[in-house]
Image: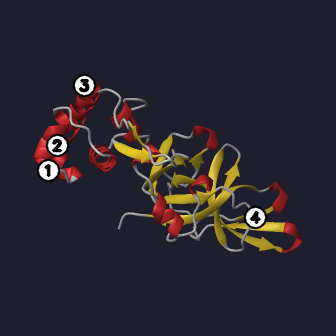
Amino acid sequence: MFSLKSDSGAAKEEQVAAVPAVDDFVERLKKICSIAGNASALAKKAGISNSGFSRYLNGGEPSRKVLISLAQAAGVNLNWLATGEGAMEKSAEAARPGSLTLLPFLGTAESPGDEVIPGRKKNLTSQAFCRFWLGSHGLDSKTLAAMQIRGDSMSPTVRDEDLVLIDVNAKDIQDDKIYVIQDADSLLIRRLQLQPGGKVRTLCDNPTHREFEVPREALEIVGRVVWRGALL
């Protein structure tokens, strides 16, 4: 509790209820103790003495600072801990600010002989990436999708089983960059080169695979490959 004074100087007490009901709050404390392992573990993680934490378990009212420390230590929603309202757990995004973000995963190839990949409608799952790492390289998670490559047509630049990130907003052709293109019901990864007469040359970095030319307007680009990850 703290006191507020009016302009006339008369003291008025204002009840600040960090928790609406002591018994309910104690039950929430016990619940986050079990999350941390036990009361001592939670107190240590929150930077609170065991004796101080025992007071709260016996009905003592913690300060706002203590509430924040407890909520952070247990990884629970601060509003839930203080009032009992809302969800106990934080959302995935709120629980790990600046940590991981999930990107759409376009699938892997069914054919072992080339990097032909199932069409975009066959999204299978998602792939987690560090949000900070993406941002530090100028990549926007809202425009990215992940894909695993099968086959050796782009070897040695992109190899069999490599994971790539595709910027699906990057549909304008930058000469000699690598793109994912739609070919009938499949997706292909190719290096694109602009040619005279509005043609586009689609190249494989592996010279044993064929190349072809198509009119620019006939080429359906899914996006540009902006990152490759691989096992060494």
Kindly report which numbered mark, 1 or 4, lies closer to the viewer in this rendering: 1
Q: Earlier in the sequence, mark 1 or mark 4?
A: 1
Q: CA distance from mark 4 to mark 3?
A: 62 Å
Q: Percent from the top left, x then y, of residue 163?
A: 47, 58
Q: Percent from the top left, x then y, of residue 86?
A: 43, 31
Q: Nearer the viewer, residue 228 or 196?
A: 228
Within 10 Å of the Cα at label 2, are there few (<14), some (14-19), or many (20+) other Cα atoms? many
Q: Earlier in the sequence, mark 4 or mark 3?
A: 3
Q: Would residue 34 be seen by someone viewing this image from the given angle?
A: yes
Residue type (three-letter) at the residue carrying disc 4: Asp
Q: Nearer the viewer, residue 209 or 22?
A: 22
Q: Would residue 88 be seen by someone viewing this image from the given angle?
A: no
Within 10 Å of the Cα at label 4, are there few (<14), some (14-19), or many (20+) other Cα atoms? few
Residue beneath disc 3: 23
Give residue 49's mark: 1
Give residue 3's mark: none
Kindly report which numbered mark, 2 or 4, lies closer to the viewer in this rendering: 2
Q: CA distance from mark 3 to mark 1?
A: 21 Å
Q: Secondary structure at mark 2?
A: helix
Q: Percent from the top left, x then y, of residue 107?
A: 52, 45
Q: Is residue 109 above or below residue 25?
A: below
Which residue corresponds to the image point at 59% horizontal and 58% vertical from the top-left? 166
Residue type (three-letter) at the residue carrying disc 2: Phe
Residue beneath disc 4: 172
Rendered-image quadrant of the N terminus: top left
Q: Quadrant of residue 153?
A: bottom right
